Image (cartoon, helix red, strand yellow):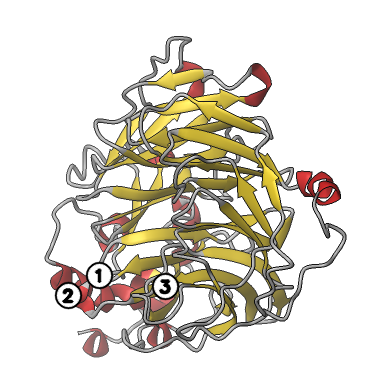
């Protein structure tokens, strides 16, 4: 069986209900493990947190989500505990038995933080996964210590939780562009003011020394105490170069001073804080429409991915960029039929990445496979490894699991056609799809005698 065909890798798009029915029928074949969790309110962001427990057949891990409500109850930042079944443990008949309208027993809410406004984006601090940053419809970035924050009840009129830190520096709302540095507690943001802003959480120490009551510990009972406000820290740098809203930002994996950004001006910009606040390289027409997302390869730092409203993902090699910003993509990945909302490299394999879009599809790609199937299977998009079609509306965010690299969490914002609310899915494709071909053939060959010895009357 051709894995790409089994994964539904053709370009032709079926109606949502038909596509979903076909996908659900193939779940036992395509997935090593799958969990579906119905959300009362959509989550616009999802992130894995720290691993809590390792056991024989499954692990337990934190999961960060949000609840984007209609105002009848407050918006919240949700901390959940998730049980992740280990590879080759779940039975095929078990993973196929799920109810779209039910909540998965593998996902349990642990704590709720009442967030001041919608949670548009969540990012965890690599040096301490209990520290997360959030974007909402405001100029500020909010920093939360999710362990010390009190558990709150999200009822109408409840007092908002108080952030542990507020990062100030934008002049207009900053809603989606957010990243945290891998090596130092640095935070990066972009906003409607067309700027990219850089902070260091370390600056909190010097900020406390200059603020009244700075030596007092913040209250942790969730009560509203105007005498104890959240500390505010100012930016280390503000970087100007975009001509429209900055939609996404990303640190270079090995640097606290190098980063990139994309925006509604169709530009991809590379920055270096050591050389000043002006762009190092500005690619004027990285796409033919607004850019929504960018990701920098954590293993091969020359490679940068971008996703756009033109429905494509483009792969750039920064060694191809010139001083005047000219740089053609290495490859343009085409399979989505609507705007690409999120791109993310695999943390484990340098050539593999994922993309999600408004078409409800989450694609897994391997750029090393470009050209492999172009002659024999012209309808298959080059480099496409797998199509996850379990969501029935736009997939707004997803995240690879660092502790279990082929396990992915994804969330969709479901429209009225599917009952509203949202859907959280945790899934791992069967490893026969992504493992080396010869390795797979060798494993399947072990079962050759069993298959050939099957009685002919039973086989028929």
**Disc 2 vs disc 1: Cβ atoms closer than 8 Å?**
yes
Give the camera-side residue of 55 and 78. 78
Q: Element under label 3?
A: strand
The C terminus is located in which quarter?
Answer: bottom left
Q: Mark 1 points at which residue?
A: 392
Q: Is residue 381 above or below residue 244?
A: below
Foreground: disc 2 or disc 1: 2
- x, y (%) of residue 11? 18, 50
Query: Residue at left 50%, top 48%?
Result: 139
Q: How far apart are marks 2 and 3 (CA)?
A: 19 Å
Mark yes or no: residue 452 visible. Answer: no
Q: Name the residue under label 2.
A: 417
- Residues under numbered marks 2 and 3 in contact, where contact means CB atoms less than 8 Å apart: no
* Farthest residue, direction top: 323
Instruction: Give residue 272's quadrant in the image.
Output: top right
Q: Is mark 1 on a helix, strand or loop?
A: loop
Above/below status of 69 relative to 445: below
Q: Is residue 178 left or right of residue 209?
A: left
Residue at image point 39% right, 18% down = 327
Q: Residue 188 vs residue 6: left or right?
A: right
Crowding around mark 3 (Cα neighbors within 10 Å: few <14, some 14 to 19, many 20+) is: some
- Can you tell which of label 2 and label 3 is closer to the viewer? 2
Residue 100 visible somewhere in the drawing: yes
Give the alpha-carbon distance from disc 1 to disc 3, as whole Å: 12 Å
**Label located before the other in sequence (1 or 3):** 1
Which residue is painted at 76% across and 74% down in the image?
219
Q: Which of 349 and 238 is in front in this view?
A: 238
**First of labels 2, 3 by sequence position:** 2
Q: Residue at x 43, y 10 (%)?
A: 324
> Which of the image's four quarters has the N terminus?
bottom left
Query: Quick one: 113 or 269, which is closer to the camera?
Result: 113
């Amino acid at each position: 069986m051709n894995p790409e065909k089994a994964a539904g890798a053709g370009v032709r798009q079926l109606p949502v209900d038909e596509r979903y029915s076909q996908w659900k029928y193939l779940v036992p074949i395509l997935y090593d493990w799958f969990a579906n969790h119905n959300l009362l309110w959509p989550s616009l962001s999802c992130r894995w947190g720290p691993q809590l427990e390792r056991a024989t057949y499954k692990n337990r891990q934190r999961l960060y989500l949000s609840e984007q409500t209609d105002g009848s109850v407050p918006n919240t930042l949700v901390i959940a505990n998730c049980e992740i079944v280990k590879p080759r443990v779940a039975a095929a008949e078990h993973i196929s038995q799920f109810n779209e309208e039910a909540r998965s027993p593998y996902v349990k809410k642990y704590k709720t933080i009442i967030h001041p406004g919608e949670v548009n984006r969540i990012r965890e601090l690599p040096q301490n996964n209990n520290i997360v940053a959030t974007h909402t419809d405001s100029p500020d970035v909010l920093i939360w210590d999710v362990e010390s924050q009190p558990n709150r009840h999200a009822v109408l009129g409840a007092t908002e939780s108080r952030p542990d830190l507020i990062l100030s520096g934008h002049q207009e709302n900053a809603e989606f562009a957010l990243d945290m540095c891998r090596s130092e507690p640095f935070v990066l943001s972009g906003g409607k003011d067309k700027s990219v802003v850089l902070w260091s959480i370390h600056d909190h120490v010097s900020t406390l020394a200059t603020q009244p009551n700075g030596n007092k510990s913040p209250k942790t009972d969730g009560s509203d105490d105007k005498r104890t406000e959240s500390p505010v820290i100012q930016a280390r740098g503000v970087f100007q170069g975009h001509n429209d809203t900055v939609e996404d930002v990303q640190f270079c994996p090995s640097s606290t001073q190098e980063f990139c950004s994309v925006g509604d001006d169709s530009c991809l910009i590379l920055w270096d804080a050591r050389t000043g606040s002006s762009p190092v390289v500005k690619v004027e027409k990285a796409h033919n429409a607004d850019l929504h997302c960018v990701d920098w390869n954590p293993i091969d730092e020359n490679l940068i991915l971008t996703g756009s409203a033109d429905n494509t993902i483009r792969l750039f090699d920064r060694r191809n960029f010139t001083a005047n910003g000219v740089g053609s993509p290495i490859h343009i990945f085409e399979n989505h039929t609507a705007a690409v909302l999120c791109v993310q490299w695999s943390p484990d394999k340098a050539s593999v990445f994922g993309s999600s879009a408004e078409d409800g599809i989450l694609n897994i790609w391997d750029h090393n496979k470009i050209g492999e199937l172009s002659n024999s299977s012209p309808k298959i998009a080059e480099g496409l490894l797998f199509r996850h079609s379990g969501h029935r509306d736009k997939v707004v965010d997803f995240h690879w699991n660092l502790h279990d690299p082929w396990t992915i969490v994804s969330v969709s914002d479901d429209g009225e056609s599917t009952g509203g609310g949202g859907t959280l899915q945790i899934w791992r494709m069967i490893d026969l799809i992504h493992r080396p071909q010869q390795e797979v053939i060798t494993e399947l060959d072990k079962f050759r005698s069993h298959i050939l010895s099957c009685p002919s009357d039973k086989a028929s």
